[in-house]
């Protein structure tokens, strides 16, 4: 074989080696790109799943907050507000025509019992007080902001004294009167308005 032919064969062998090497490199590079793409896709999938889980958890928390607020309104404060407004109406009827602007039922038990109309009103007031007591004592976990106001304690004590006094015809004990706490109404109204506003805000955040 001549030197020219030998050179040609050598050149062909070199070209074949280079082509084979390039093909191998391309295969490796393609595999690496495919692996990287798969890894990125897996990472993105995990991130989306975690985001969906967190979003679902946040939505569930918001829903639970709304449900609790609705329970506070529907099962405790709403009924209490209605009862107190009815009681205040009856109380105004009981005090009609009284010269004393600071007239108190506990100061006039005997005369109220002697008047059939006033006695009937007083008994209805006692019944409504009892319903309020049942609501408060039956739903302590629904108290607004988890704080039991002093006015609630005073009201519960007052309701018990009025009931016993009306039954006995006199104030029991040593005459220490527990008058109706006016702040009880204020606390109820404030809590009710606060819950309505909380529900509005929670509903907006959940949408």
Image (spheres, rainbow, N blue to C red):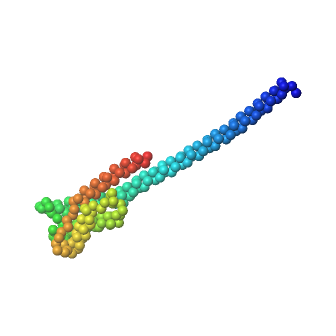
Would residue 131 be seen by someone viewing this image from the given angle? no
Q: Residue at x 25, y 62 (%)?
A: 150
Vertical position of residue 138 compared to residue 69: above or below: below
Q: Nearer the viewer, residue 106 or 67?
A: 67
Most extreme residue toward the front, as rendered? 3
Would residue 129 be seen by someone viewing this image from the given angle? yes
Q: Residue 160's spot in the image, x, y percent? A: 25, 70
Q: Residue at x 17, y 62 (%)?
A: 95
Q: Is residue 44 left or right of 174 when viewed as pictured?
A: right
Q: Residue at x 59, y 46 (%)?
A: 42
Q: Residue 164's spot in the image, x, y percent? A: 23, 73
Q: Is residue 21 left or right of 94 when viewed as pictured?
A: right
Q: Is residue 18 left or right of 45 when viewed as pictured?
A: right
Q: Residue 152's spot in the image, x, y percent? A: 27, 63
| Corner quadrant of residue 141 | bottom left
Vertical position of residue 38 compared to residue 103: above or below: above
Where the N terminus falls, by quadrant?
top right
| Corner quadrant of residue 192 | bottom left
Q: Is residue 153 left or right of 25 when viewed as pictured?
A: left
């Amino acid at each position: 074989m001549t030197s020219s032919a030998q050179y040609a064969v050598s050149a062909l062998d070199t070209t074949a080696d280079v082509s084979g090497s390039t093909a191998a490199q391309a295969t490796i590079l393609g595999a690496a790109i495919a692996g990287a793409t798969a890894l990125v896709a897996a990472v993105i999938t995990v991130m989306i799943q975690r985001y969906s889980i967190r979003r679902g958890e946040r939505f569930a928390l918001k829903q639970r907050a709304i449900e609790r607020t609705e329970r506070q309104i529907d099962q405790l404060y709403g009924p209490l507000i209605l009862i107190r407004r009815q009681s205040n109406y009856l109380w105004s009827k009981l005090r009609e025509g009284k010269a004393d602007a600071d007239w108190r039922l506990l100061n006039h038990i005997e005369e109220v019992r002697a008047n059939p109309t006033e006695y009937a009103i007083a008994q209805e007031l006692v019944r409504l007080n009892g319903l309020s007591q049942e609501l408060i004592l039956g739903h302590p976990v629904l108290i607004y902001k988890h704080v039991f106001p002093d006015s609630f304690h005073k009201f519960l004590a007052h309701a018990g004294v009025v009931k016993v006094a009306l039954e006995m015809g006199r104030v029991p004990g040593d005459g220490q009167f527990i008058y109706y706490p006016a702040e009880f109404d204020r606390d109820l109204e404030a809590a009710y308005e606060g819950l309505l506003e909380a529900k509005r805000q929670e509903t907006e955040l959940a949408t």
